[in-house]
Every structure is written in structure tokens, then in C-alpha cells.
Image (cartoon, grey):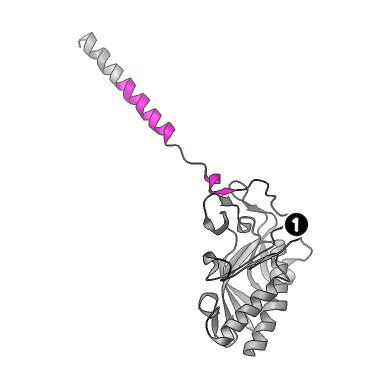
Amino acid sequence: MNVKRFSTKVIGWLIAGFAIVGVSACSSTPNLTDDFSSAGVRPPSGKCSVDPRSIADAVSIGNVDGRGACGIKNAWKVTAVGDVAFSTPARVRCQMVGATSRWIKNAVQPAARSTFGEPVVKLRIAASYACRARNNKRGAKISEHAFGNALDVSAFTLASGRVVEVQSGWNGGRKESSFLKQVHGKSCGTFTTVLGPNADAAHRNHFHFDLGKHGRSGKGKYCR
């Protein structure tokens, strides 16, 4: 082979190789933690004063590790709280189990009995643990869902089988609307954050409850 032609081919191969390397370097996998901001955020502790198994159908799943700041300390998989079943198992931190139990006892059942004359027997779980930003908005602050510190509920099933959905019932029939607004209003006595259809478009079809800390003292509440 002519030396000049061989040298030209080698140079061509080298240039092509560098080009491929360059493309690979420039198209590296994006940093997924950029999906949310966790600056200044401290994940909640795993301490709990009540054994979830004493108040719920719950199984300990240890600690859940997620990317970035996501994860749950002392996580539990819950399929029911007391006599109220979950439509799908929820993964939450220990303290959320106790809070949900108190919420059902102090907000949900009194509202159901006073409005419909019967108890709630099932919750439709819209979300529990999820490693994401608030309202799934890229670049927003990390969600309490990312710590297993939140629960979303989109509907309530009564003992008779009647289903009250947040989206259609909030401004729907008189009883459905009254029940949902009672539950929403009383929920602030248990959770530090309560969001519903009046909060924003992202919550038009469910209630969001969490135990996030607000204000300098960490004891503030945000209920809308």
C-alpha cells in the first residue's frame, strides 16, 4: 500500500475516533438531582413514639434509599389504618402512620358519620413515597413525598359502597361537598400541610397531607 495513502487513512480513523469520544462526552447522562432543589432541606428523623403495627396493617421495610436527598428513615408499607383499607399500599415514614390514624379518628370518621350516618372504610391513595419535586415541577423544592412524609388521598369509600371523590365532590352535591370540606378543615389539627382543590390546579383532584416543617420554629402550618 502507498505510504501516503495509508497515513491518510490512519489520520481519518483517528479523527473519527476522537469525534465519537467527543459526542459521548457531550451527551453524558444529565444529573437527575437537578430535577429538584434540596438546598437547606433536612430529611425528617426516623423516630416514632407508636409502633405502627399496633394501629395499622403495616410492615417495616427499614430505610429506603433514593437518589440525591430522597429516602425514608424507618419506612413502613401500610395497607390499612385501623378499619380503613388503602386502595394501594403506601410507603411512608413511621410518624405518618400515627398521624394518619389520628386524622381518620378525629377528622374523617366524625365528618362521615355526621354527614352520611356511616363510616369511611377505604381511602383511595393517590401518592405516598416518590422521589420528586413539589407538584412534579422541575427545579422546584424537593417534595415531602421524597421523604415518605406525605400522603395524597383522592377519594373516600363509605360502608355502603358510596364513593366520594375529591375532584367531583368538592363543589358537587351538598353532602359530598360538606363532608370533604369538613375533612379538609379538620385536617390541619393533625398535619402541618394540607392542600386541596382551593390550593392550586395541581390539587384539584386530591388532598395532600404532610408533616413538613414551616417557619423558623418549624412548628408552623400551611393549610389551603
Quadrant of the rendered image containing residue 135: bottom right
Question: Quick one: label 1, few (<14), some, or many (20+) residues within 10 Å?
Answer: few
Horizontally, is 115 left or right of 166 in the view?
A: right
Would you place residue 80 above or below residue 9 in this image?
A: below
Q: Amino acid at mark 1?
A: Gly
Residue nearest the observer in this picture, 150 or 4:
150
Residue nearest the observer in this picture, 38 or 217:
217
Would you place residue 30 above or below residue 209 in this image?
A: above
Residue farthest along the bottom direction in this orientation: 117
Which span of residues is magenta-colored?
A: 13-42
The residue indicated by pointer 1 is 218
Q: Which residue is rendered at x = 60% and y = 52% of the image?
A: 142
Horizontally, is 25 left or right of 172 in the view?
A: left
Residue nearest the observer in this picture, 131 or 215:
215
Residue nearest the observer in this picture, 52 or 150:
150
Q: Which secondary structure, mark 1?
A: loop
Quadrant of the rendered image containing residue 131: bottom right
Is residue 167 one of those drawn in magenta? no
- Res 83 visible: no
Residue 94: % across, % down: 71, 62
Position of the C terminus, as image quadrant, is bottom right
Residue farthest along the left direction in this orientation: 2
Mainly helix, strand or loop, the magenta region?
helix
Residue 3: % across, % down: 23, 9
Residue 149: % across, % down: 66, 60
Q: Which residue is rendered at x = 60% and y = 50% of the image?
A: 66
Position of the N terminus, as image quadrant, is top left
- Res 85 visible: yes
Total marks shown come to 1
Q: Which residue is rendered at x = 30% and y = 17% of the image?
A: 11
Residue 207: % across, % down: 59, 70
Is residue 39 one of those drawn in magenta? yes
